[in-house]
Every structure is written in C-alpha cells, then in structure tokens.
Image (cartoon, rainbow, N blue to C red):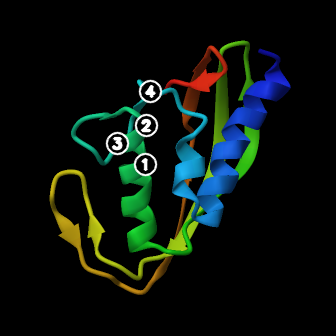
C-alpha cells in the first residue's frame, strides 16, 4: 500500500472520530487489531473493544478532538504526532474501573501513536 494510502486510512479513522461517528472510526481497523492505551492495564483487542474505548472518551468529553500535527510514514506503518483537546463534561471511566468525576475543564495533550498496517487495515 502506498504511503499516501496509509495516511488516508488513519485520517479516515480520525475524521470519523472527530465527528463522533465511532462505528466509522473503527472501520479501518482489522477485526483482530490491538489498540494500546497507556491508561489501560491491557490492550483493547478487536474492533468492538476499540470502539468501546473511543466511546468512553467521547462520553467523558463530547467535544474530544484529535488534530494531527506531523506524519512519518513507512511502507507498513504510520507515526502521527497529534494534539488532543476537549472539555471534561462527563464521568471518565478508566479501564481500571476508576471513575473521574466531570471537572468541566478544558484540556489539551500531545501524543505519538504508531499505526501498523497490513492488508489495507490498521492493526495497532
């Protein structure tokens, strides 16, 4: 898959996530994909588990938005620098079961995920 197609696959997921269309956001993921979240004690395994992880973040921050700032692309992976921002308006249920009550405060954070791509789908 060409490098531009790899970026398009990741962008498709991000754009759907930013619109709040979580079913579309997980479509680029393979059904057996693994999503690692540093806040989770275990990786989210499979498309449905990934959708639930996305859903949890959107419930806590309905305006959650991911904004890519830089791309590094290879034949089988995409590394993306991003800024994520939102307003903490709902209870944030962590994968550990702990719940952070709403603060109604805006936040911004930066991240650098690595997406592995195989067979035209996101794997990690």
Identify the element where label 4 is drawn.
loop
Distance (Cα) linking label 4 and label 2:
6 Å
Contact between marks 4 and 3 (CB within 8 A): the answer is: no
For mark 2, does the 10 Å Cα neighbourhood hold few (<14), some (14 to 19), or many (20 or more) residues? many
Instruction: Give the label on residue 71, or none.
Output: none
Q: For this rendering, which residue is in front, 84 or 13?
A: 13
- The CA distance from mark 1 to mark 3 is 5 Å
Question: Residue 46, percent across and down?
Answer: 38, 32
Query: For the residues marked 2 and 1, what is the alpha-carbon distance in whole angstroms?
Result: 6 Å
Q: CA distance from mark 1 to mark 4?
A: 11 Å
The residue sitting at the left extreme is: 97
- Answer with mark 1 or mark 4, whichever residue precedes in sequence: 4
Q: Are marks 4 and 2 in contact (CB under 8 Å)?
A: yes
For disc 4, the marked residue is: 33
* Mark 4 or 2, nearer chain start: 4
Marks 1 and 3 in Cβ contact (< 8 Å): yes
Residue occupying the point 16% across, 62% down: 98
What is the number of the mark on residue 47?
Answer: 2
Q: Which residue is mark 3?
A: 49
The answer to whether the residues at label 2 and label 1 have Cβ atoms under 8 Å apart is yes
Q: Judging from the image, what secondary structure is the residue with disc 1 in?
A: helix
Give the left or right position of residue 32, taking residue 26 as reference: left
- From this view, report whether residue 104 is shown above or below residue 88: below
For disc 4, the neighbor class at 10 Å (few under 14, some 14 to 19, many from 20) is many
Q: CA distance from mark 4 to mark 3?
A: 10 Å
Identify the residue at horizontal 63%, vertical 14% (top origin): 119
Label placed on residue 51: 1
Quadrant in the picture for residue 113? top right
Residue 66 coordinates in the image, percent (x, y):
62, 57
Q: Earlier in the sequence, mark 4 or mark 3?
A: 4
Q: Secondary structure at mark 3?
A: helix
């Amino acid at each position: 898959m060409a490098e531009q197609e790899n970026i398009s696959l990741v962008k498709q997921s991000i754009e759907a996530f930013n619109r709040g269309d979580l079913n579309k956001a997980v479509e680029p993921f393979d059904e057996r994909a693994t999503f690692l979240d540093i806040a989770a004690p275990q990786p989210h395994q499979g498309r449905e588990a990934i959708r639930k992880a996305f859903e949890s973040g959107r419930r806590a921050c309905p305006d959650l938005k991911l904004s890519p700032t830089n791309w590094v692309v290879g034949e089988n992976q995409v590394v993306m620098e991003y800024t994520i921002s939102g307003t903490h308006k709902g209870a944030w249920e962590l994968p550990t079961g702990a719940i952070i009550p709403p603060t109604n405060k805006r936040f911004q954070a930066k991240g650098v995920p690595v997406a592995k791509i195989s067979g035209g789908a996101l794997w990690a």
